[in-house]
Every structure is written in structure tokens, then in C-alpha cells.
Image (cartoon, rainbow, N blue to C red):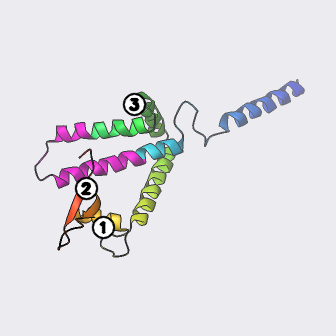
Amino acid sequence: MKNILKYAIVALAGVLLFACGDGENVPKKYMSKEEMSAILRDMSIADSYGNEQIMNNFHIINDSLRQNTQKVYYKQVLDLHKVTVPQFMESYQYYEAHPNRLKEVLQMVQADLEARKQRLGDPVDENAPVRFRLRNIFPNADSVMLLPKSDTVIPFVKRHPNI
């Protein structure tokens, strides 16, 4: 009888040990922390871009139009990462149910955005990349072209084809 009790205790301990293992890994049916971080980072950039476009337009855009525009940007981000809306929502709900994992993902997003911001530098700084400084002067500029046969230097803005 004592042997059966010992085996039962060992078996129960083994089951509990395996049940608690692998706690840091995300189940395979959900997106990994890295994938979720990349998507949320790109959504944050899309959000900033949308807000910047509203600020650059001098007319007031109603909130429903802004929300529809943001939805288009978010869909483009999901398409870029080859993820469907239901897949993203299912994974996002999983991370919401596990706040420690969501916190790790959001910290990864924040660190990535900070690193990107540091690489750009200060737009006022003369050592900042020229392309970044030009975008402050000409917000939609890809490059500045100079006319070769003129006596004055006149910058022309080459606009992005989608604008």
C-alpha cells in the first residue's frame, strides 16, 4: 500500500512539473512575441503617419474619416506581415489575457521605436542625415533637384507618386 502511495505521489509531482513547464513560450496557434512586436510597431508608425497627415492638412477632418483612414493603414500593416485580421485579433486577445507577455511585447515595441528615433537624429542638428532634414523643409520630398541651366538655385520637390 505504501508503494502505491509513493508511486501516486511521484506521478502527481511529475504531472504538475510538466503542467507548469514551458510557461514563457507562446502557444503555436498565436503569433510569437517578435511577430506581434513587429506588427504593433508598424501600427504605431502608421498611426503617427496618419496623425502627421492630418496636421499637415490645414482643414479639419472629422473623426469618422480619420478612423477609416487608420483602419486602411492597419489593414496595410497586416497585409505587409501576411496576417489576417482574425489571426491578429485572436493573438492580441491572448496577449491581453496574459498581461506580463503583453508588457514584454510593448517594451520590445518601445525599444525598437526608440532605436529608430536615435538613428534619425535631431532634425535641427546639422549632423542629422540630409534626407531627414530635407523632409522637415519639404514634408513630401523624396529628393531635391536643381535646374542645371539657371543662374539661381531653385529647389524643386520630387513628390512621391502616391501623393
- Please identify, in this view, whether the residue under mark 3 or under mark 1 is nearer the observer: 1
Query: Disc 1 vs disc 2: which is toward the camera?
Result: 2
Point out the tag, 3 or 1, that comes first from the N-terminus: 3
Instruction: Please give the residue where the numbered disc 3 appears in the rendered image.
Output: 85
Q: CA distance from mark 3 to mark 1?
A: 36 Å
Q: Quadrant of residue 154?
A: bottom left
Task: Name which residue lies at 60% across and 40% down.
Answer: 25
* Residue 52 located within the stretch drawn in magenta: yes
Q: Secondary structure at mark 2?
A: strand
Question: Which span is picked out in magenta?
Answer: 41-69
Task: State the residue lying farthest toward the bottom.
Answer: 126
Q: Position of residue 23 (x, y in %)?
A: 62, 40
| Residue pointed to by mark 2 | 158
What predominant SS class does the magenta segment belong to?
helix
Taking the view exactly as shown, the residue that stands out farthest to the left is: 59
Q: Residue at x 67, y 33 (%)?
A: 19
Q: Which mark is residue 133?
A: 1
Q: Earlier in the sequence, mark 1 or mark 2?
A: 1
Q: Amino acid at mark 2?
A: Lys
Residue 99 in view, yes or no: no
Q: Is residue 34 above or below residue 139?
A: above
- In percent of width and height, residue 84 lies at 42, 30
Q: Secondary structure at mark 3?
A: helix
Q: Amino acid at mark 3?
A: Val
SS category of the residue bearing label 1: helix
116 or 111: nearer the viewer: 116
